[in-house]
Amino acid sequence: MLNVDNVSCLRGERRLITALSFTVQQGRLLAVTGENGSGKTSLLRMLCGLLPPEQGRILWEDQDVRACRERFLASLIYVGHLNSLKDDLTPVENVTISARLAGEEISEGKTCEALEAVGLARVIHRLPTRVLSQGQKRRVSLARLWMSQRPLWILDEPFAALDASATGLLMQQLRSHLHNGGIVIAATHQEIDVGADRLDQLRLAG
Amino acid sequence: MSQPGIFAALNEIIRRDLLLVLRRRSDVLTTVLFFIMVASLFPLGVGPEPAVLRTIAPGVLWVAALLSCLLSLGRLFTADYVDGVLEQMLLIPQPLSVLVIGKVAAHWLISGLPVVLLSPLLGLQFGLSGEALGVLTLSLLLGTPTLSFIGAIGAALTLGVRGSSVLIALLVLPLFIPVLIFGAGAVTSSASGIGAGAHLSLLGAGLLLALALAPWATATSLRIALE
């Protein structure tokens, strides 16, 4: 369970978020919506610990995330609006290295399975990432969701650049994760179809 | 914090950075060629007088090493910052300072170690004795990692800032001065028969100090840069 307690965020001179509180229970997806510049990315970055809140607390399983940083980060996958890929590495190398850096013991075989699950054919697994399209790069970036058992997914515009088939695959993976008791927080402009009983909405006014 | 996890992350970041250099060899070649060019231009400009060359050799070779290190510092974190990989590194359960040590170690292997290995060869151009060449190599072996650690602080502080390469130079060059003085001084002392022990000890102490403080300072700067 993730609790956000009275959190505020100031970016430069502008107050983006004021005294925001909410809870996301296991098996639920929180869709964060709002206009451009309303603070969606800032909120997600605060939840991950990349941006310190001006005030308030973020609790993971009833513990302040600052007090249980290692345990919290070991429970988290964050996919930002950047793909976090090195153009000179192959998709397999990119995904394997980032997973290993995050402390997961991943074989290249398992990475290949994840890349296939996200709809990337084996023929492009060993190509330099720089030759892939934006949509393919996004799929590579999202492949970690198919490899990890981590319960908390924080996703910033996960559907950006994805075609209909990749969107369908991701939606299916989100449903499966929620079904297994996971938590998803996603900033998105797209309708998320995971079932009304699993979906919460948070609209930021900015 | 599990120690195997820390060492695995350290190993992985070094391996990744070396793999990236293998894919883009021009980066390492630029640094090495710059070092060779700078060190080789001085004998051509100063003239063939052996005594003069022997006198200026330690300073010239050390300044060339320092400038070639500076040349590669801009790349230390910029690419990871631009493509979002640095953001992911901040979310790794291991301490960020461990990853910084890995990045600095890779930077030294790529830009510092070739300089150390080439220095005896370039020292021959200046007519340095065998003993002086040995001291030069040892001083660079102790001093260049310190340059990488200090440089990492500057690279992190100027991350995302316009004109960062000039700013890095302004920030770190004053901090490089003690390393330059003790490094070049070691060779000069050895050549004049005083012995290089004191200078090398100070270089070693500087390296330990940099290893203790620079990763923490760099990690803090990176966090601020990404907020």
Image (cartoon, rainbow, N blue to C red):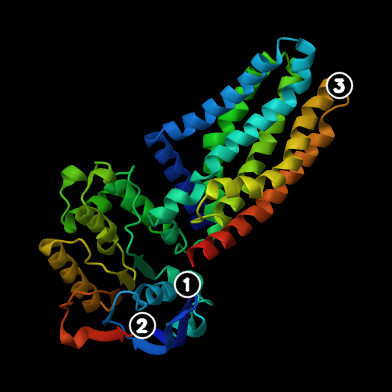
Q: Which residue is mark 1?
A: A51
Q: Which residue is mark 3?
A: B192
What is the number of the mark on residue B138?
none
Q: Amino acid at mark 3?
A: Ser
Whole-angstrom CA distance, mark 1 to mark 2, is 17 Å
Image spot of residue A3 (x, y percent): 40, 86
Pointers 3 and 2 within a single chain: no
The chain letter for the residue carrying disc 2 is A
Q: Amino acid at mark 2?
A: Gly
Q: Which residue is mark 2?
A: A206
Along the line of sight, which residue is nearer the eye, B51 or A53? B51
Q: Secondary structure at mark 1?
A: loop
Whole-angstrom CA distance, mark 3 to mark 1, is 56 Å
Q: Secondary structure at mark 3?
A: loop
Residue A27 as seen in the image, left or right of residue B190: left
Going from N to C along the chain, the mark reached first, 1 or 2, is 1
Residue A16 as seen in the image, left or right of residue A130: right
Quarter of the image for residue A46 reads bottom left
Asked if residue A171 can be seen in this view, the reply is yes
